[in-house]
Image (cartoon, helix red, strand yellow):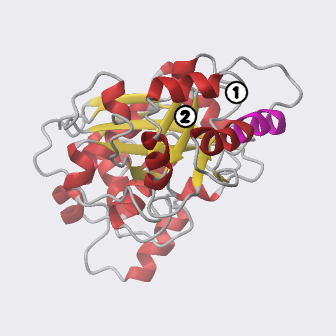
Amino acid sequence: MIGSEDLPLFDEAKPWEEVQAALLALELGDGLPLVPPTRARIDRMLSGVKSPAGSHGQVPPLFGELTAEAVAYNCVLAGCEPAELPVVLTAVAACLQPEFNLLGIQTTTGTPTVAVIVHGHAEYKLGMNSGVNCLGPGNRANACIGRAVRLALANIGGAKPGVGDMATMGQPGKYGFAFAEGDHVLLQPLHVRRGLAPKQSAVTVLGVSGTMEVLPREGRDTPECVLEPVVAAMIGAKEAAGAGKVRPGGEQFFLLPPEMADQLAKHRWTLERIQDFMFRETVAGTPQDIHPVIAGGAGVKMTYTPLWMGGTMSVTTPVIDL
């Protein structure tokens, strides 16, 4: 795990291949090539940060100290720009809230990873993608922020495969999982629904077991046709991952593309009506635990993001002012 005194830096002139080999030997990567961490790159990443060594908590399972300096190092490795440092630090700090259960997520044999949703001014300032292929490749900010969060969790927290991270198989989202929330008249943004100002930069972290594509029923011209398959996915996920145990209801998140949001808005459904309808048969704790999020581009495919069945709750928090 990385502490402020344990940050290996490399001379600008050191051959790229040698840097990669050294970082690999130190187990500081994720298997993909890394940006060489040099003094100049770290200083640039930390430019303007008031307290680089100030603690924001300890990251399990080995409880390394979470500092801006340690996060900056992982941001450099991941290819981030300096403006992205506060979002990455905020996301990792949000994971330390007790209800998120980061220790469980970091050490389980299951598949969970940390998904990061960015809201408000930050998503526009950083040029993040909330539209076409927002969960896939192509957008530098989405990719680098997601990767930096994962590297920080592994390198600061010590969750290395086979040591702290005991995942039987893991999932591709453990390389990085970050995207921006979209806009639609149907719903207020998630951070606003949770009491923050519309333009306020904020981050939500989810401990997700994966993603599942969900299509509306044939016809797809009523809210019921849109939402019933999502309910079926939620029920199926509980059956598949519940190990036959009766588990308490929890939060449910799904991503709603604009075309499907248009259908719901056309019929004048509100968030409350969506939640009440889905709660009748789903596995959420309360109607208010059902969270549709606007994301994606053209098309009718929705995405269900089941939270880890081992026990986790989402956390939304303003971006830290560094």
Q: Is residue 166 left or right of residue 301?
A: right
Q: Is residue 132 above or below residue 246?
A: below
Of residues 135 and 103, the one drawn nearer to the viewer in this rendering: 135
Q: Is residue 197 left or right of residue 115?
A: left
Query: What is the crowding at mark 1: few (fewer than 14 residues within 10 Å), some, or many (at least 20)?
Result: many
Question: At x 57% / y 67%, what residue is drawn?
Answer: 31
Which percent across, then down, holds residue 23? 47, 65
Question: At x 24% / y 39%, what residue is drawn?
Answer: 201
Question: At x 38% / y 59%, what residue is drawn?
Answer: 142
Please give the range of residues in magenta: 233-241
Q: Secondary structure at mark 2?
A: loop
Amino acid type at circle 2 is Leu
Q: Earlier in the sequence, mark 2 or mark 1?
A: 2
Q: Is residue 219 magenta?
A: no
Which percent across, then down, holds residue 85? 27, 49
Which percent across, then down, holds residue 75? 34, 56
Q: Is residue 238 magenta?
A: yes
The quarter holding residue 300 reads bottom right
Residue linked to disc 2: 62
Distance of mark 2 from mark 1, alpha carbons?
36 Å
Amino acid type at circle 1 is Thr
Residue linked to disc 1: 282
Which percent across, then down, holds residue 297? 44, 62
Q: Is residue 318 left or right of residue 15?
A: left
Question: At x 68% / y 21%, what residue is drawn?
Answer: 280
Q: Do labels 2 and 1 touch, CB within 8 Å?
A: no
Q: Secondary structure at mark 1?
A: loop
Query: What is the crowding at mark 2: few (fewer than 14 residues within 10 Å), some, or many (at least 20)?
Result: some
The quarter holding residue 185 reads top left
